[in-house]
Image (spheres, rainbow, N blue to C red):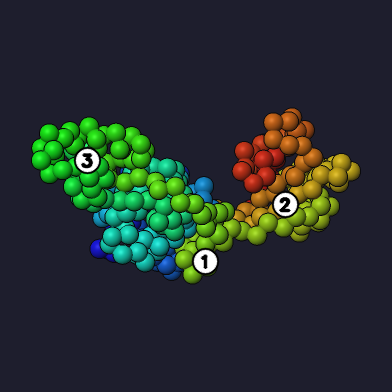
């Protein structure tokens, strides 16, 4: 049953359309080398999560992958698939039922924790409706100790319905399940994935330096400097204001590499930051950016 336990549809966010798809189904769990080949076929940098996205899911284990949402972390998804391969068939059924129950199924990270907390749920595979549950409680567990002669007059469905309401349970494709109120332990937070189960490259290193140091780097590129005097002047001004910069070297499409400089200005999200714009120059571009990591000013130039 391990085969196709989780498949994800990975798209190139810049080039993918319904008419001309640039995408691939990937079977998880997998390894970093396999993913490297997938990223190359898609034409994306695996360390830049803005270049690709998981947009759809499929599993041979029915009824749980619907809890996943587009944009989930590939590493989280791979780790989740690893954990599911380590579970028995009965545990996987319980996992899928608990995912349908839905109290800990809002993300891949939630589902990773769910695999470690299956003891927090009772699952009754043969119970599929209130009547089944009423018969189970009365006939199998003998909860009311009814005489046999009285059972033919008993409303099993109503009794089962009230018990479901009291349990807070639900009927799933795998039977009846409810949370038994055991402590739910959070094992996994913050993408803390064992290295052997990571399948995406590390993010590019970000080197923080002051504006003078970045300006020195620019002077190593005289052809660029001739066309970017305004940008250098901006860098010089930032020294006086105590503004710092982060520099990241990143690959771009068509094999060109650029150095991206992020102004780490003394302002915060939601506040107005001072921005200066150089002349419209194709080699050196300055523009506001909504970067998730450094939400200020971005400058990039070829290297």
Percent coordinates x, y for residue 204 in the rendering: 61, 58
According to the picture, the residue beneath numbered tag 1 turns out to be: 194
The N terminus lies in which quarter of the figure? Answer: bottom left
According to the picture, the residue beneath numbered tag 3 turns out to be: 134
Q: Is residue 284 visible?
A: no
Observer-nearest of 222 and 86: 86
Task: Tell me which residue sits at (36%, 40%) in the image.
Answer: 167
User: How far, Cα to Cα, is label 1 from label 2?
Assistant: 28 Å
Percent coordinates x, y for residue 17 in the rendering: 36, 41
Contact between marks 1 and 2 (CB within 8 A): the answer is: no
Observer-nearest of 267 and 154: 154
Contact between marks 1 and 3 (CB within 8 A): the answer is: no
According to the picture, the residue beneath numbered tag 2 turns out to be: 246
Question: Which of pointers 1 and 2 lies earlier in the amino acid sequence?
Answer: 1
Q: Is residue 203 visible?
A: yes
Give the mark toward the camera: 1 or 2.
1
How many labels, in total? 3
Contact between marks 3 and 2 (CB within 8 A): the answer is: no
Q: Is residue 302 left or right of residue 181?
A: right
- Disc 1 on helix, strand or loop? loop
Task: Tell me which residue sits at (44%, 47%) in the image.
Answer: 181
Q: Is residue 69 left or right of residue 267?
A: left
Establish if 71 lies above or below 33.
above
Establish if 67 lies above or below 36.
above
User: How far, Cα to Cα, is label 3 from label 2?
Assistant: 65 Å
Percent coordinates x, y for residue 133 in the rendering: 23, 42
Give the mark toward the camera: 3 or 2.
3
Percent coordinates x, y for residue 74 in the rendering: 45, 55
The C terminus lies in which quarter of the figure? Answer: bottom right
């Amino acid at each position: 049953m391990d085969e196709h336990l989780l498949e994800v549809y990975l798209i190139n966010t810049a080039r993918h359309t319904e008419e001309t798809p640039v995408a691939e189904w990937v079977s998880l769990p997998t390894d970093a080398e396999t993913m490297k080949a997938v990223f190359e076929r898609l034409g994306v940098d695996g360390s830049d999560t803005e270049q690709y996205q998981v947009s759809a899911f499929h599993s041979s284990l029915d009824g749980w992958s619907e809890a996943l949402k587009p944009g989930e972390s590939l590493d989280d998804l791979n780790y989740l698939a690893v954990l599911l391969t380590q579970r028995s068939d009965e545990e996987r059924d319980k996992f899928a039922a608990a995912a349908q129950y839905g109290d800990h199924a809002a993300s891949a990270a939630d589902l990773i924790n769910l695999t470690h907390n299956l003891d927090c749920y009772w699952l009754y595979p043969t119970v599929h409706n209130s009547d089944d549950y009423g018969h189970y409680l009365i006939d199998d567990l003998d909860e009311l100790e009814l005489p046999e002669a009285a059972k033919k007059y008993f409303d099993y469905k109503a009794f089962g319905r009230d018990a479901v309401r009291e349990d807070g349970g639900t009927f799933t494709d795998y039977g009846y399940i409810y949370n038994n109120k055991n402590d739910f332990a959070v094992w996994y937070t913050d993408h803390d994935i064992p290295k052997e189960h990571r399948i995406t490259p590390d993010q590019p290193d970000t080197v923080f330096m002051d504006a003078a140091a970045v300006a020195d780097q620019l002077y190593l590129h005289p052809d660029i400097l001739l066309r970017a005097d305004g940008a250098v002047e901006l860098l010089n001004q930032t020294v006086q204001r105590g503004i710092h910069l982060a520099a990241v070297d990143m690959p771009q499409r068509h094999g060109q590499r650029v150095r991206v400089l992020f102004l780490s200005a003394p302002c915060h999200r939601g506040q107005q930051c001072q921005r200066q714009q150089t002349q419209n120059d194709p080699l050196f571009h300055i523009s506001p950016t909504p970067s998730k990591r450094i939400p200020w000013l971005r400058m990039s130039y070829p290297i």
